[in-house]
Image (cartoon, rainbow, N blue to C red):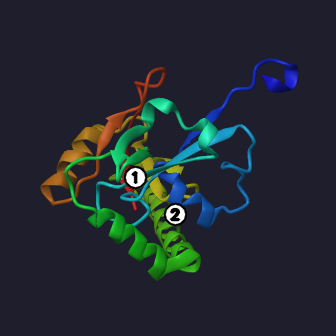
Amino acid sequence: LAADGKPDVPVHVDAASGGFVVPFLHPLVVWDFRLPRVVSINVSGHKYGLTYPGIGFVVWRNADHLPEELVFRVNYLGGDMPTFTLNFSRSGNQVVGQYYNFLRLGRDGYTQVMKCLSDTAQWLARELAIMPGADGKPVFEVISDGSAIPVVAFKLVEGTKYTVFDVSALLRSYGWQVPAYTMPDNATDVAVLRVVV
């Protein structure tokens, strides 16, 4: 829009899953503050940040982009203390866990971990694509092969006598939780299974 002289549109990047993957696997992909319109980015440490559930981060380009509605002001030690953290009655152990991983793994460690996860996801996708059914023909069609982020999505080939929901239920009976669900609006006729590596 701005290129045509219209108002500039600030962009928030929801990098909940990919924020800990793309910088390490695809460092040349420009998706972050290198783009002038990106004003904020969020990531979830409990996904590929390798900590347990309950931690997420949001970073703003600068204070001008931080919505005033998120700032909570308290009188602390006789002065105004603005903060924009979300406060709940819970421990800070997730923060400590994330900090530990940052120090322990560093960039090289996260790169090695993400490469291993990506290799595993792509191996799984290749194996699913050639897995034969009773007739000897492949039974699955891979939708997402894990090369972007370590997530494999796949569906049954046309004409299969059972559904992805049947496959999910059978896997669950063996202790594996592989969710099956339909795609969003405009593609609700497509049902897939998803494995997050």
Residue farthest left in this picture: 173
Residue farthest top in this picture: 6
Kindly state the secondary structure of the residue where label 1 is placed. Answer: strand
Tell me the residue at 54%/60% (across/down).
Answer: 21
Percent of width and height locating residue 186: 48, 20
Percent of width and height locating residue 74: 35, 42
Residue farthest bottom in this picture: 104
| Label whose residue precedes the other's in the sequence (1 or 2) | 1
Percent of width and height locating residue 99: 42, 71
Pair 1/2: label in front = 1
Crowd tier of the residue under label 2, counting other residues whose Cα lies within 10 Å: few below 14, some 14–19, many 20 or above? many
**What residue sits right under mark 2 in the picture?**
122
Crowd tier of the residue under label 1, counting other residues whose Cα lies within 10 Å: few below 14, some 14–19, many 20 or above? some
Give amino acid for label 2: Gln
Tell me the residue at 25%/39% (across/down).
Answer: 165
Quadrant of the image containing the N terminus:
top right
Tell me the residue at 40%/55% (across/down).
Answer: 136
Query: Which of the 4 image quarters holds residue 160?
Result: top left
Q: Separation of disc 1 and disc 2 at Cα?
A: 27 Å
Q: Is residue 135 visible?
A: no
Give amino acid for label 1: Gly
Q: Is residue 168 visible?
A: yes
Quadrant of the image containing the C terminus:
bottom left
Q: Is residue 110 above or below residue 162?
A: below
**What residue sits right under mark 1 in the picture?**
56
